Image (cartoon, rainbow, N blue to C red):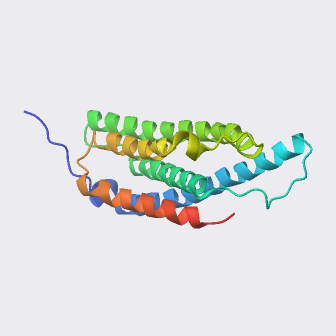
Amino acid sequence: MKKIKPHLTLTIIGTFRCYLGIALGIGYGLLINFWFRLLDKGLFLAFDLTISKVTSMAQFSASNYTNFLIALTSSSLGFCYTMYFWTSKPTYENRKATLKNRITNANSIFIFMVVLFVFTKFLTFHTPLRYDGFGIDLKSSYDYYPFFLPVFIFLFNWSIISRNYKSGKFILCSAGLVIAYGILLAEIKT
């Protein structure tokens, strides 16, 4: 007899854990957004200082494309932390469910750290090329392919959650919230 997966509900997650996870995800998304933007500006200044140029922050202007990519990646990473917190229930009714939940928990924090590391290294490489007159621009070179990164983060988290639960309407609600939060983060000026 095949066991049917339970539906993902607030009672399974826990009301306190659900709302606290959302609040922590929003906070981490905001902090990561500021981290990426300050890193981008700091690398711009460091690159100008190494080639002995006059540094002017008026020359630094990130495009709407770069702002939205950073903001959407930050909101997806915040959602990754929300998933980590939602799946942090220590024990379930049987060992197999507990093991699946721990794997889900570990995968969500693993993808969070890997993407954070890769995106930080990407900004280190991308910023000097953007402002030294090389003419390498992310949008003109790769179109919208970099936006697959936040989409991958979001869908990866839901794929590991869907191993344990049926999560139909939660996916649609969270997709809208992550995109809306990404747009809100893109509007914040640092």
The spot of residue 124 in percent (x, y) is 70, 39
The answer to whether residue 90 shows anywhere in this view is: no
Count of number-bearing discs: 0
Q: Is residue 186 above or below residue 83?
A: below
Name the image quarter holding the N terminus: top left
Q: Residue at x 59, y 36 (%)?
A: 118
Q: Which is nearer the eye, 172 or 137? A: 137
With 140 as the anchor, is 160 left or right in this view?
Answer: left
Q: Is residue 31 visible?
A: yes
Quarter where residue 169 is shown: bottom left
Measuring 38% from the left and 34% from the top, which residue is drawn there?
103
Q: Nearer the viewer, residue 91 or 125?
A: 125
> Can you give x and y, in whole percent of width and height, for residue 152 in the image?
42, 41
- In the visual, does 97 lie left or right of 16? left
21 above or below 52?
Answer: below
> Which corner quadrant holds the C terminus?
bottom right
Judge from the rendering whether residue 104 lies leftward or rightward of residue 12; answer left or right. Answer: right
Image coordinates of residue 29 in percent, x first then y, are 55, 56
Residue 183 position, x and y percent, is 50, 63
Q: Nearer the viewer, residue 112 or 13?
A: 112
